[in-house]
Structure formats: C-alpha cells, structure tokens
C-alpha cells in the first residue's frame, strides 16, 4: 500500500487502511472531527489532528498528531502501527519509505500457560556496553540483574523454564541471542523474551528506568539514537538489513506492548522510589525484532547518574528489580486473556 507524504511525514489514506482486513470498519464524522475504527469487539476512537486515541476506555498517547484531513482522511505511520497492534489484527506488516507491506496470517490463540522465559543480559565479553562512574561497565550490571531475575522467576513460576542467553562474561551477537530464544519457541510452546540493559547519556542529571517494546516508528530522535547504540555495535549491516526486511506480527507486537506496560507498573510499585520510573516507550531494537514471541527491553537505570548507579550495584535493588519484573509477568498473564475481549 502506497504511503503519501505531508510535511516530510508518511501517511496512509483511510481507503487503504480499511483494505488491510475485510473485517476492519471505519466511521468518521468530518463535522465532529471524530471517528472510530472497529475490529471484532475492539473499538478505537480518535479525533482529527490529536496526538492521542482511546481503546476500551484507555487513552494512549502518540508522539505527534495521528490524523490529518487534506481532501480526505489520512493516518500517520505511527498511528497505523498503533491501530494494527491495538486492534489485534491477524496480519504481519513492515513499513519502508513509501509503502506499507501487509501479509495476512492466522489469528493467534490466547495462551494462559507460560512455558518458558528467556532473560538476555545485554552486552558481554568484548562488548562492555555503556560505561558509568568509576568505570563500571553495563555488561556487569546486566549480568547480575539477569541472575537475580532468573532466581526470582524460578521461585515465583515453578512450572516455567527460565533460561539465560549468557550466564557469564561472554560475547554473543544479537542474532545469536534471538536464536537462543526462538529455539525454545517450538511445539506450540509459549514464552517471553526479556532483554536487560543499562542506560547512559551526556547529562549526569538524567535518571530513571524505562521499558521498551518493538515498533517501527522512527519519529522519536532519542529512540533512534538509543536504537543505534544498542543494536548496531558489533553487528554487520547485512544482518540489520535482513532483520529490517522481515515482517512483524501485529498480534505479537500487541502482546509485547501489554508485557511492557505490565512490567513497567510492576517495577514502579516494587522499586518504590529506588530508581525513578520514566516511561513505557517503543523503538526498533534489533534484539527485539529478531524475537518470535512477546519481547521487551528494560533500560534499568542510568550508569551516568550517581544515584542510579549506586542503586544498580546494590543487592537490595537487584532483588527489588527482580520482584518487580516478576510481578509484571504475573499481571501480563492475567491481562492476556482479558485483552482479547
């Protein structure tokens, strides 16, 4: 489907939007400047030119306005991706500069039982990751957090197998990390992928944790810079191009978004001010794009902030972090079935 350009941003026409799936319904009142998009029992409400929308009584924010009217109704690329995932359309998709590629797929069955969790400690070996005060290396922080999380998840979910992509100071390419997780995702098994990282910035005042899920929107400059830092180092351009050529499942993306929100709230409640909660965000991380299951990336705090770093290195924080993520996983499993309604 062809995208059109307005003010150097890509938009999809309303006519092309409803062609994505035969059961997708769109109603729009030009007079009221409001509309709704319906798929099955799920309804998405929007207003012309606004940077928010509503689904099932929940208001979600966009990075910029989602719609415009120029001799017809058009939806921003970011908003189209939100529509596909929030309405849980059984499609895979990919954007390029001028087109939206769509492939129909069978509707995923909701799974109530979790079979496995793969924890990915970011970086390792020759890849130290971000450097903090006192030359603390990201790879060491993420490994300690991964071990703490594995221990907690095994205690809280005794029936679930919990794996680490690396258990020591060893370098693995992103492709290998995804492959380790995807090998577990067979014979109808249902699993989650959780990648752990530490953040850094030029300003020592910036602090807090964030939880990311995969999205293809590149409008956010901060997310673009972080994507490059976490995804490209030690990776061949051929592998990145291969990943970008793949279509992404809208249904898996929606589950990933639900997981990210659940883990963020679980961490916020459990950490109780240890490290400031920032936001649930979206970015095109290669390690998430390679996953064939719900996947999130946690930026646990800023190594370049003295307060965050002190917490990240403490056993108290590591245990609280693990408890918060575990609580989030539990909430996610509860929400998964409810979200299908």
Image: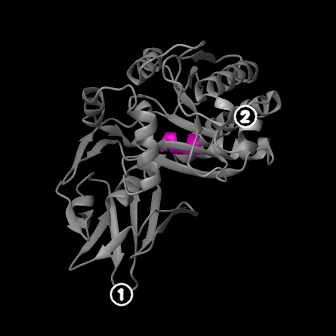
Up-down relation of residue 27 to residue 249 (above or below): below
- The magenta-colored residue range is 254-260
- In the picture provided, is 18 more to the left or to the right than 173? left
Residue occupying the far front of the picture: 134
Foreground label between 2 and 1? 2
Q: Earlier in the sequence, mark 2 or mark 1?
A: 1
Residue 202 shown in magenta: no
Q: Secondary structure at mark 2?
A: helix
Residue 246 occupies quadrant: top left
Residue in the picture at 61% in, 28% down: 137
Q: How is the image coloured?
A: one colour
Relative image position of residue 21 (x, y in whole percent): 27, 51
Q: Does 335 sit left or right of 268 as displayed?
A: left
Return the residue at label 1.
31
Badge 2, how many Cα within 10 Å: few under 14, some, many 20+? many
Residue 312 is labelled as 2
């Amino acid at each position: 489907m062809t995208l059109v350009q307005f003010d150097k941003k890509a938009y999809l026409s309303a006519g092309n939007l409803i062609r994505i799936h035969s059961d997708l319904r769109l109603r729009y009142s030009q007079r009221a400047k409001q509309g709704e998009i319906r798929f099955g029992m799920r309804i998405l409400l929007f207003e012309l030119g606004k940077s928010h929308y509503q689904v099932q009584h929940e208001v979600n924010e966009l990075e910029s306005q989602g719609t415009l009217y120029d001799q017809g109704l058009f939806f921003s690329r970011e908003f189209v991706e939100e529509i596909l995932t929030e309405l849980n359309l059984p499609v895979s998709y990919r954007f390029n500069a001028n087109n939206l590629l769509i492939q129909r797929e069978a509707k995923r069955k909701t799974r109530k039982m979790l079979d496995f969790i793969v924890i990915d400690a970011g970086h390792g070996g020759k890849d130290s990751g971000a450097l903090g005060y006192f030359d603390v290396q990201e790879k060491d922080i993420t490994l300690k957090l991964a071990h703490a999380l594995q221990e907690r998840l095994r205690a809280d979910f005794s029936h679930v197998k919990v794996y680490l992509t690396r258990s020591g100071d060893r370098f693995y390419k992103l492709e290998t990390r995804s492959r380790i997780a995807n090998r577990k995702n067979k014979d109808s098994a249902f699993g989650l992928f959780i990648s752990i990282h530490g953040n850094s910035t030029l300003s020592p005042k910036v602090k807090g944790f964030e939880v990311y899920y995969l999205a293809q929107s590149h409008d956010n400059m901060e997310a673009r810079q972080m994507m490059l830092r976490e995804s490209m180092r030690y990776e061949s351009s051929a592998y990145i191009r291969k990943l970008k050529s793949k279509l992404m499942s809208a249904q898996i993306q929606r589950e990933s978004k639900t997981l990210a929100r659940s883990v963020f709230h679980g961490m916020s409640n459990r950490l109780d001010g240890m490290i400031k909660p920032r936001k649930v965000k979206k970015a095109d991380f290669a390690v998430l794009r390679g996953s064939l299951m719900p996947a999130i990336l946690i930026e646990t705090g800023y190594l370049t902030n003295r307060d965050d770093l002190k917490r990240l290195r403490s056993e108290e924080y590591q245990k609280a972090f693990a408890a918060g993520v575990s609580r989030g996983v539990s909430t996610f499993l509860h929400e998964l079935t409810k979200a299908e309604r």
